[in-house]
Amino acid sequence: MLKKTHRLRKSKDYKRLVQNSRSCHFGALSVRVMPNQKDITRVGVVAGIAISKKAVVRNRVRRQLQEIVRLFLKERELKKGFDIMVRPDARAIGRSYNELRNMLGNIFEKIGVYVG
């Protein structure tokens, strides 16, 4: 699980990201990124009902993506000072952990927040 300091928790932060951010899509994932004027990168994973009507399926995908982001942050592979929202779609269901990790790594490289 992501540390509290690395999580986007308030709805105003998500609204700000949706309105004022850059976005990038790759495979089954889309990411929105915006500088946050802080010395920490905060991440939120949004898995809505459009992915699946079953909460078990949505939560599995969400937990996998949160763990991938946690490891990126732990290994210092993401630049500091960004708010990031990761949004999977229905194609993310059934993907392996490594496939999701590669997709997310490619998106982070494209969007310019990947260091490693």
Image: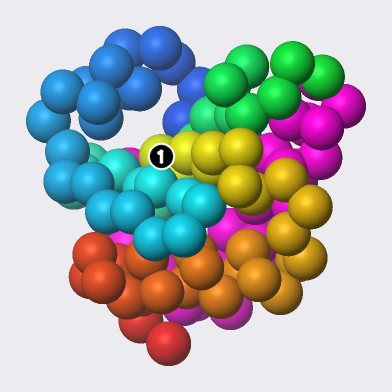
Q: Which residue is mark 1?
A: 85
Please state, as top left, top right, bottom left or bottom right, where the C terminus lies in the image: bottom left
Q: How many marks?
A: 1
Q: Secondary structure at mark 1?
A: strand
Quick one: which residue is furthest to the right in this view?
56
Q: Residue pushed farthest front?
A: 91
Name the one closer to the observer, 4 or 34. Answer: 34
Left or right of 52? Residue 108 is left
Residue plotted at (72% across, 45% down):
93
For this rendering, which residue is in front, 79 or 47?
A: 47
Quadrant of image for the N terminus: top right
The residue stretch that appears in magenta: 55-84
Q: Residues within 10 Å of mark 1 (few under 14, many from 20)?
A: many
Q: Is residue 61 left or right of residue 14?
A: right
With respect to residue 95, does 71 lie above or below? Answer: below
Q: Is residue 114 magenta?
A: no
Image-based side of 50 in relation to 13, left or right? right
The kind of residue tagged 1 is Met
Q: Main secondary structure of the magenta part?
A: helix
Reply above or below: 79 against 77: above
Q: Position of residue 11 (x, y in %)?
A: 40, 12
Q: Is residue 80 magenta?
A: yes
Give x and y (percent) for residue 23.
23, 46
**Residue 74 rendering spot, x and y as whole percentages:** 61, 70
The x and y percentages for residue 34 are 20, 44
Res 18 seen here:
yes
Q: Which residue does the image show at 32% across and 22% down from the upper left?
A: 13
Which quarter of the figure has residue 24? Answer: bottom left
The answer to whether residue 40 of the structure is visible from this angle is: no
Name the image quarter holding residue 50.
top right
The residue that appears at 32% across and 62% down in the rendered structure is: 80
Render colour scheme: rainbow
